[in-house]
């Protein structure tokens, strides 16, 4: 579990399903996401397929972002543990529309990045962003990530080919 001033981050649990469905099924807010559940059952299946072991090479883990004040799941952070040496991670965030623009994404990302670098000793963290997702680009740039690549029509998401921008930060660049 990771804790900051206003939020708690912990692995997703089956009982989180309705709260996750509420914000993840919003197609407009999540138009840059590759996974938008259509039914509550889709969330149940997603949670059931998550690995039991956290920080296992070549797996994705998902952390719930819980607002302390309300004790409600307001978003989630996906973490991909990359490579056999498991010294790199990829992260991505999804946040409920009604919690956007209030600093929750910045707080959750900072806490996650701190944890990955300082507790799990990662060397490098990357994130993959649709170039039209300007809010996410501003978020990662504000956190100190630098743009490393722009891949043209490299991902097939929601029935169309989209570009993908890769941002990264190294341990020794994180303050």
Image: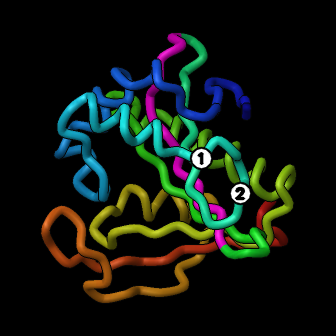
**Residue 22: percent from left, percent from top:** 28, 26
**Residue 81: percent from left, percent from top:** 65, 63
Which quadrant of the figure has residue 37? top left
In the image shown, does 143 or 164 lie closer to the viewer? 164
- Residue 56 in the magenta stretch? The answer is no
Q: Are there few (<14), some (14-19), or many (20+) residues within 10 Å of tag 2?
A: some
Q: Are there few (<14), some (14-19), or many (20+) residues within 10 Å of tag 1?
A: some
**Residue that lies at the very extreme toward the left in this rendered image:** 159
Q: Colour scheme used in the picture?
A: rainbow
Q: Residue at the spot x=27%, y=31% of the render? A: 41
Q: Residue at the spot x=54%, y=13% of the render? A: 71
**Helix, strand or loop status at disc 2:** loop
Which quadrant of the figure has residue 163? bottom left
Can see residue 144? no
Q: Which residue is mark 2?
A: 56
* Residue extent of the magenta highlight: 70-82
**Helix, strand or loop status at disc 1:** loop
**Residue 67: percent from left, percent from top:** 54, 21
Which quadrant of the figure has residue 47? top left
- Secondary structure, magenta segment, majority class: strand
Give me the disc on residue 51.
1
Q: Is residue 85 above or below residue 153?
A: above
Quadrant housing the N terminus: top right
Q: Residue at the spot x=20%, y=33% of the render? A: 39
**Lower position in the chain sequence, tag 1 or tag 2:** 1
Asked if residue 88 lies left or right of residue 13, the reply is right
Give me the disc on residue 131.
none
Residues under numbered marks 1 and 2 in contact, where contact means CB atoms less than 8 Å apart: yes
């Amino acid at each position: 579990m990771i804790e900051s001033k206003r939020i708690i981050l912990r692995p997703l649990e089956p009982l989180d399903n309705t709260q996750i469905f509420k914000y993840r099924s919003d197609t407009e807010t999540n138009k840059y996401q590759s996974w938008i559940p259509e039914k509550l059952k889709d969330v149940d299946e997603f949670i059931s397929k998550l690995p039991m072991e956290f920080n296992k090479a070549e797996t994705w883990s998902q952390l719930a972002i819980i607002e302390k004040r309300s004790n409600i799941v307001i978003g989630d952070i996906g973490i991909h543990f990359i490579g056999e040496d498991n010294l790199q991670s990829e992260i991505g965030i999804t946040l409920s529309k009604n919690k956007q623009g209030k600093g929750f994404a910045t707080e959750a990302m900072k806490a996650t990045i701190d944890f990955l670098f300082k507790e799990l000793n990662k060397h490098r963290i990357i994130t993959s962003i649709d170039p039209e997702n300007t809010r996410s680009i501003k978020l990662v740039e504000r956190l100190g990530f630098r743009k490393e690549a722009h891949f043209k029509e490299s991902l097939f998401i929601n029935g169309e080919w989209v570009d993908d921008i890769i941002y990264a930060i190294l341990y020794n660049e994180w303050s």
